[in-house]
Image (cartoon, rainbow, N blue to C red):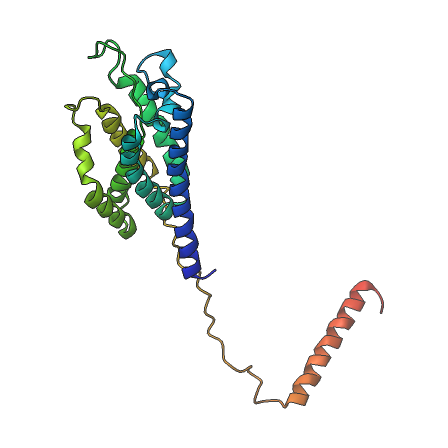
Amino acid sequence: MDSITRERDQLLAALKTSVVAVGFLWVLHLVRLFLLQTPGSWGILPRRIDGLLGIITAPLAHSGWGHLANNSVPLLATIFLLTYFYPRVASRAMVLMYALTGILVWLLARGEGWGADITISHVGASGVAYAFVSFLFFLGIFKRSVQSIVVALIILFYFSGMIAGVLPDQLNVSWESHLLGGIVGALVAWMFRSSVLDYRKPEPKEEYVDAPFFASDTFVYTKREREAIRQQAIEAERIRRSLEEGEY
């Protein structure tokens, strides 16, 4: 497979993965509306046993179309970048960030008895999106390859505005999910810093053998003489094998 074909296939695979993942969120949003389920019923309820399921379901639920649309853009971009530039570790890293972000939100976010008078349900994929953005940025710092640094600069340029999302002065916003997701992304980037390899490996080079273009006896014997020598060698080999097998 030539390099252009490999690049095209990798690009299409990454694009397909990101579109399918975000499309799945939109389908689930429609399903939840059809079932008349509130987003809070899918959310994380910190430090409550009945809120543990939200670790899995919370990123799949959104409070409205605007909330879903706002999260779709960074998810599309980061999933694409992860699967395109780091295909060998993308799936493992994303699953780990998804789970760890939810676990930390369940352990540490606002809830009953922790700065809140009512039960707070944390919903939305923004914490996961922050984890993906953070992973891509910090991996560039830790890995220090040209590719990873370029990706980190892209992330810094396009998503620097997300930094404000971790400030604890926003009503009805799970800033804890954003902050904890960012921390998780950095930690997972540190964990994968040594195992991440660029998929663009140089083509293996054929070993160069410094041999003459013509055989050494090209100008010593005629073509007929070389053929006679070859036949003698064949006959000698046949006799040798026959002697070994006891025919002589």
In the rendered image, is residue 184 in sight? no
> Is 61 situated left or right of 166 in this image?
right
Q: How many marks?
A: 0
* Residue 85: % across, % down: 35, 48
The answer to whether residue 110 of the structure is visible from this angle is yes
Q: Is residue 110 above or below residue 207?
A: above
Residue located at (58% from left, 85% from top):
217
Residue 177 appears left or right of 223: left
Residue 65 position (above or below residue 244): above
Quadrant, the C terminus? bottom right
Residue 131 falls in which quadrant of the image? top left
Point 35% across, 26% down: residue? 61
Q: Nearer the viewer, residue 215 or 55?
A: 55
Q: Is residue 159 above or below residue 200?
A: above
Q: Nearer the viewer, residue 99 or 161?
A: 161
Image x and y of residue 6, in percent: 43, 56
Q: Position of residue 88 (x, y in %)?
A: 41, 44
Q: Quadrant of residue 79?
A: top left
In the displayed structure, 183 sits above or below 105; it is below
Left or right: where 62 falls relative to 234: left
At horizontal 29% and vertical 21% (from top left) the residue drawn is 122
Q: Residue furthest right?
A: 247
> Residue 228 appears at what percent x and percent y?
70, 85
Name the residue: 36% across, 45% down.
86
Taking 173 as reference, is 91 left or right? Answer: right
